[in-house]
Amino acid sequence: MQEESFFDKVYEVARQIPYGKVTSYGAIAKYLGAARSARMVGWAMNNSHTKDVPAHRVVNRVGVLTGKHHFDGTNLMQQLLENEGVKVVDNQIVDFQKHFWDPIKELD
């Protein structure tokens, strides 16, 4: 049996982010026991578009939509978040802590 890849583990966590919530690349990395691998989580999100992963719910540690240029259309990431009730101003989530979902607290 093939061992699950790091990217697959990232996708598994990202699929559990609830509607209307966001998390950060670093929070996913920390949950997976790879605290210094936030950039790898970002690479996983960049490659997730064919994997049914809500990548729009993963942002940087202060709530900035750093991955937005990887979505089709100029504001697709923002539109997807706003459709879920997450307000975004100047590419940053308003009330980030209110919307933040921490996999360490929420999973297991």
Image: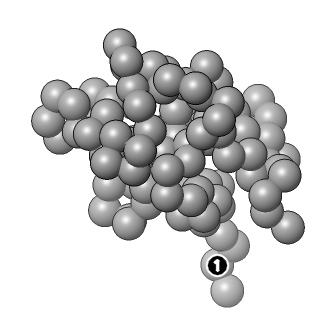
Q: Is residue 94 left or right of residue 91?
A: right
Q: Quadrant of the C terminus?
A: bottom right
- Residue 36 placement (x, y as % from top left): 76, 29
Residue at 56 percent across and 47 percent down: it is: 21
Q: Is residue 26 above or below residue 47?
A: above
Of residues 85 and 67, the one nearer the viewer is 85
Q: Amino acid at mark 1?
A: Gln
Q: Position of residue 77 (x, y in %)?
A: 31, 38
Q: Residue 34 occupies which quadrant of the picture?
A: top right
Quick one: quadrant of the N terminus?
A: bottom right
Is residue 5 at all visible to an observer of this figure?
Answer: no
Q: At which x and y percent is residue 3?
A: 69, 73
Disc 1 residue crowd, few under 14, some 14–19, many 20+, Cα 10 Å:
few
Q: Residue furthest left?
A: 73
Report the coloring of the rendering: one colour
**Residue found at x 50% / y 23%:** 94
Q: In the image, 24: left or right of 50? A: right
User: Of all residues shown, which one is farthest toward the top?
Assistant: 90
Residue 16 position by quadrant: bottom right
Relative to 19, is 23 above or below? above
Name which quarter of the figure residue 23 lies in: top right
Taking depth in this image into account, of 2 and 65 the one nearest to the observer is 65
Tell me which residue sits at (17%, 41%) in the image: 72
Return the residue at label 1: 2
Element on which disc 1 rests: loop
Residue 82 seen in the current view: yes
Towards the viewer: 81 or 45 = 81
How many discs appear?
Answer: 1
Residue 61 x/y as whole percent: 64, 24
- For the point 37% across and 18% down, the residue is 89
Name of the residue lying farthest toward the bottom: 1
